[in-house]
Image (spheres, helix red, strand yellow):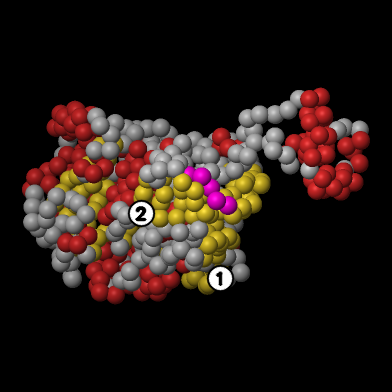
């Protein structure tokens, strides 16, 4: 896609080369037939070969576009089935196609049901075997395989708990990143390419296809409905009360469809909880943009063919349910400046529903390996009962939305991530400051936080962040970036730029340099300066005397007293722990 691919000067050249390389590679691949695949999922070359051919057969109603680069070196591509005679993919797509759906596959290429199911879906739609009702002016976008590097890294063993297919890709991408944690921090080129496409394509329905982990039970099909109460109230409520029930009614009962079995304790009889996906996850990101999203998770121990069929059934039912309700989809984005934004959602254990569930009996038997007791599900004994389903989440933090944010030009890694997204959501939201000026707003000083002890997805993630706000006039310089909070951008900006948000750029460590003090003092030098400073500042001196009474230990070790005066004087650097993003009033 031109507007993304032209971001780097030599990128189109590189992609041209890669496409050429790939083309010759693709010719060697055996054609893949998704209808007779049985226990196999296609290789990357077969996937591209399949969509190449489909595009050649149906050139006027399909597009086979490049969204941008991936870490694997190959371009990230999307296959679109669009109304005929459409202009090149651009802004006008949303006008010509008022209904838009995006399916993302192979984010975890070891869980490839959606790769096979989407191929069948595309072929069935194009051959006319599947005809949508109310399907006029509708665009279907399919990312055939998102994690290309993982797809190339095939084996038969990396999913030890899974029953087929015979060979499949690996969870990590070419940089060993889990792409389903990368939608905000965007360390992968895949995430940069896809998030910008989502922000500008603005689908009304999004699917991310997976395979389950965890307990054994008879159901083949499970799903995660995105945290609908995180979205704006009308759209979220419509999704939960109208769209989801309509989808479930359309899915054949043989799949035993239930919400994702995220067990409270080891086995499902203990109850299940909803999965609260923060914005780092695919459907967590789309819900920030008020896009209804479903994570489809088929059961890992069912035969692969059944899992592909179940995934297909959910996709078909979901799209048809959306088309049936196309005239009653509430508009997205109602959050505006001065309104309260709710964030840092977690499971609400005060509220539960009952769910009729069929499980396998769990037994503890002696392990053949160690002799210790081990869990076994007895598939010849099933039970059906009502279990607790903690299906609700609640926000643990909130704050007022400012009119916008100023990000100083120095923070290029943050700007590179957020500016293209804000522009894709609302092209008028980004303005570069033209000349030095001052602006009124509030700024945060980081007071406290905790940091994970081991690396998590390439970062040492911060949590439990507390800050102190200061309202001030702040100098902003030519070249700094102002991003306006509009109905389209406010949610995403709050999730990423509010320093207390769990997936903010501060939490991911992009602002870590502010946490380190750059200058210090020698005790023997500062002893005299401190005395002189307090003499010149009598009110600070009385504060100091009061503080001293609370610290009898300062008589034995004076470093605490020195630090107190230093940190309350002009000698202390003002930028230490000062979060540099201005919340504009
Ligand atoms: Zn997965």
Instruction: Look at the image and tell me whether residue 394 can be seen.
Output: yes
Please determine whether, in this image, residue 352 is positioned above or below residue 461.
below
Q: Which residue is mark 1?
A: 352
Which residue occupies 63% across, 39% down?
574
Q: Which residue is mark 2?
A: 429
Q: Is 368 situated left or right of 434 in this image?
A: right
Does the magenta-highlighted stretch encompass residue 378? no
Quick one: which residue is furthest to the front in this view? Answer: 536
Residues at circles 2 and 1 in contact by the CB criterion of under 8 Å:
no
Neighbours of disc 2 within 10 Å: few (<14), some (14-19), many (20+) = some
Viewer-proximal residue among 179 and 291:
291
Which residue occupies 8% across, 49% down?
59
Instruction: Look at the image and tell me whether residue 107 can be seen.
Output: no
Query: How many angstroms separate mark 2 from mark 1 (CA)?
Result: 40 Å
Which residue occupies 30% across, 58% down?
202
- Quadrant hosting residue 242: bottom left
Quadrant occupied by the N terminus: top left
SS for tag 2?
loop
Q: Is 225 situated left or right of 104 in this image?
A: right
Q: Residue 479 placed where, x, y %?
A: 40, 40
Q: Residue 520 placed where, x, y %?
A: 70, 29
Q: Is 65 situated left or right of 344 in this image?
A: left
Viewer-proximal residue among 353 and 94:
94
Q: Which span is picked out in magenta?
A: 472-476
Does any atom of ligand 1 lie closer than 8 Å to the CB of label 2?
no
Which residue occupies 59% across, 54% down?
471
Please determine whether, in this image, residue 359 is positioned above or below residue 473.
below
Please determine whether, in this image, residue 94 is positioned above or below residue 179.
below
SS for tag 1?
loop
Would you say the magenta stretch is mainly helix, strand or loop? strand
């Amino acid at each position: 896609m031109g507007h993304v691919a032209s971001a780097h000067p030599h990128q189109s050249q590189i992609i041209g080369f890669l496409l050429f390389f790939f083309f010759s590679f693709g010719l060697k691949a055996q054609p893949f037939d998704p209808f007779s695949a049985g226990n196999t999922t296609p290789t990357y070359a077969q996937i591209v070969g399949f969509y190449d051919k489909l595009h050649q057969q149906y050139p006027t109603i399909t597009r086979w576009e490049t969204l941008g680069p991936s870490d694997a070196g190959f371009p990230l591509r999307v296959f679109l089935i669009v109304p005929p005679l459409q202009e090149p993919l651009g802004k006008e797509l949303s006008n010509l196609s008022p209904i838009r759906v995006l399916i993302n596959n192979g984010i975890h290429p070891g869980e490839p049901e959606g790769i096979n199911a989407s191929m069948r879906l595309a072929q069935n739609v194009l051959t006319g075997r599947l005809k949508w009702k109310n399907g006029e002016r509708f665009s279907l976008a399919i990312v055939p395989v998102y994690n290309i590097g993982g797809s190339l890294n095939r084996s038969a063993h990396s999913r030890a708990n899974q029953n087929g297919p015979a060979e499949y890709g690996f969870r990590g991408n070419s940089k060993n990143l889990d792409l389903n944690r990368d939608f905000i921090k965007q360390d992968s080129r895949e995430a940069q390419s896809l998030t910008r496409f989502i922000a500008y394509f603005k689908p009304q329905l999004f699917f991310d296809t997976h395979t389950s982990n965890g307990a054994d039970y008879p159901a083949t099909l499970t799903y995660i409905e995105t945290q609908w109460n995180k979205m704006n109230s009308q759209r979220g409520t419509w999704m939960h009360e109208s769209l989801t029930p309509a989808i479930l009614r359309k899915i054949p009962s043989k799949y035993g469809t239930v919400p994702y079995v995220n067990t409270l304790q080891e086995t499902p009889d203990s109850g299940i909880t909803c999965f609260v996906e923060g914005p780092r996850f695919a459907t967590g990101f789309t819900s920030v943009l008020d896009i209804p999203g479903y994570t489809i998770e088929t059961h890992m121990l069912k035969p692969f063919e059944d899992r592909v069929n179940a995934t297909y059934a959910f996709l078909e039912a979901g799209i048809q349910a959306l088309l049936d309700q196309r005239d009653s989809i509430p508009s997205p984005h109602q959050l505006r400046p001065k309104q309260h934004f709710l964030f840092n959602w977690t499971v609400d254990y005060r509220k539960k529903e009952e769910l009729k569930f069929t499980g396998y009996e769990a037994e503890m038997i002696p392990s053949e390996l160690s002799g210790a007791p081990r869990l076994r599900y007895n598939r010849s004994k099933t039970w059906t009962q009502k279990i607790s389903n903690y299906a609700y989440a609640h926000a643990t933090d909130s704050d007022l939305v400012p009119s916008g944010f100023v990000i100083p030009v120095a923070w290029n890694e943050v700007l590179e991530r957020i500016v293209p997204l804000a522009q894709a959501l609302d092209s008028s939201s980004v303005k570069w400051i033209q000349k030095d000026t001052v602006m009124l707003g509030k700024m945060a000083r980081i007071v406290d936080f905790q940091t994970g002890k081991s690396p998590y997805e390439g970062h040492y993630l911060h949590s439990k962040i507390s800050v102190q706000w200061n309202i001030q006039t702040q100098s902003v310089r030519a070249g700094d970036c102002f991003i306006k909070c509009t109905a389209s951008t406010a949610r995403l900006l709050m999730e990423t730029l509010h320093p207390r948000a769990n997936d903010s750029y501060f939490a991911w460590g992009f602002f870590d340099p502010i946490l380190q003090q750059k200058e210090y003092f020698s005790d023997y030098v500062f002893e005299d300066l401190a005395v002189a400073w307090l003499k010149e500042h009598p009110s600070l001196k009385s504060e100091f005397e009061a503080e001293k009474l609370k610290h009898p230990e300062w008589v034995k070790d004076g470093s605490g007293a020195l630090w107190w005066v230093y940190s309350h004087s002009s000698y202390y650097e003002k930028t230490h722990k000062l979060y540099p993003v201005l919340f504009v009033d």
